[in-house]
Image (cartoon, helix red, strand yellow):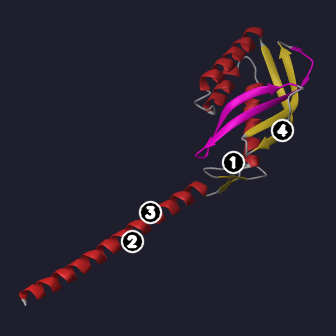
């Protein structure tokens, strides 16, 4: 009789233990599902930002770039690079370097340093008037067309039509420049 009582107690204890294991496993699975869904919603949450005095807002998220945001940042980068004087060139180039991807930082810094030395030594000033910006948020690049006016001292040189391509990377809501190059007439404008 004692043997049957022990077996029934062990059986009850075993069934409780099995129930506890099932509850713990169920809670663990539900916690994993909740953690995944919260991480997914955080990364894909979109926010609309309207710049002060701006007419259009843009949508940002951790993974996607809005075309309007890309156009606006492209214009800012073009102006920082090309609207320079011997006094402002270092400040403008430092602004660009703040938005440069770490993998491309040394090459872009070297290129900007060479440009700054030429601009300072020859007293060159330039102004770029943007006529068209075409951005491709899928491939993270923009092509900017416009007219570049250059001055050496007080003497104005002939204005030139120019096109530039800026390439980007976008990670965790941060836009970074990976390349900045002038496009020649033969280069395709596939943006």
Q: Secondary structure at mark 2?
A: helix
Between label 2 and label 1, give the one nearer the viewer: 2
Q: Quadrant of residue 154?
A: top right
Q: Residues within 10 Å of mark 1 (few under 14, many from 20)?
A: many
**Do labels 4 and 1 touch, CB within 8 Å?**
no
Check if mark 3's residue and mark 1's residue have beta carbons within 8 Å: no
Residue 26 circle label: 2
What is the chief secondary structure element of the magenta stretch? strand
Q: Which one is earlier in the sequence, the residue at label 4 or at label 2?
A: 2
Q: CA distance from mark 2 to mark 1?
A: 38 Å
Q: Which residues are magenta?
A: 155-184
**Is residue 88 visible to the viewer in this orientation of the structure?**
no
User: Which residue lies under the disc numbered 1?
Assistant: 65
Query: Label 4 belongs to which residue?
Result: 190
Tag in front: 4 or 2: 2
Residue 183 falls left or right of residue 81: right
Q: State the residue at coordinates (83%, 28%).
A: 128
As measured in the structure, the alpha-carbon distance from the residue carrying label 3 to the one carrying label 1 is 29 Å
Residue 111 found in image quarter? top right
Real-space Cα separation, disc 4 to disc 2, in angstroms: 52 Å
Left or right? Give the position of 67 relative to 147. Answer: left
Q: Position of residue 115 (x, y in %)?
A: 72, 16
What is the crowding at mark 4: few (fewer than 14 residues within 10 Å), some, or many (at least 20)? few
Q: CA distance from mark 3 to mark 2?
A: 10 Å
Name which residue lies at 61% across and 56% down. 44
What residue is shown with label 3? 32
Q: From where the camera sits, is residue 18 visible? A: yes
Mark 4 lies on a secondary structure that is loop
Q: Quadrant of the N terminus?
A: bottom left
* 123 or 28: nearer the viewer: 28
């Amino acid at each position: 009789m004692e043997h049957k009582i022990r077996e029934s107690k062990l059986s009850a204890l075993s069934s409780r233990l099995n129930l506890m294991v099932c509850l713990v496993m169920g809670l663990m699975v539900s916690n994993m599902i909740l953690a995944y869904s919260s991480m997914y919603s955080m990364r894909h949450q979109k926010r609309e930002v309207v710049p002060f005095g701006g007419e259009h807002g843009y949508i940002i998220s951790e993974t996607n770039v809005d075309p309007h945001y890309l156009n606006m940042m492209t214009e800012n980068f073009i102006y920082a690079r090309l609207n320079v004087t011997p006094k402002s060139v270092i400040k403008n180039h430092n602004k660009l370097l703040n938005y440069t991807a770490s993998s491309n930082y040394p090459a872009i810094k070297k290129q900007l340093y060479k440009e700054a030395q030429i601009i300072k030594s020859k007293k060159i000033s330039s102004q770029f008037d943007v006529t068209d910006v075409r951005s491709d948020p899928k491939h993270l690049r923009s092509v900017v067309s416009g007219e570049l006016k250059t001055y050496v001292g007080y003497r104005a040189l002939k204005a030139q039509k120019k096109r530039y391509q800026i390439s980007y990377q976008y990670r965790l809501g941060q836009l970074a420049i990976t390349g900045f190059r002038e496009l020649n007439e033969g280069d395709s404008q596939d943006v």
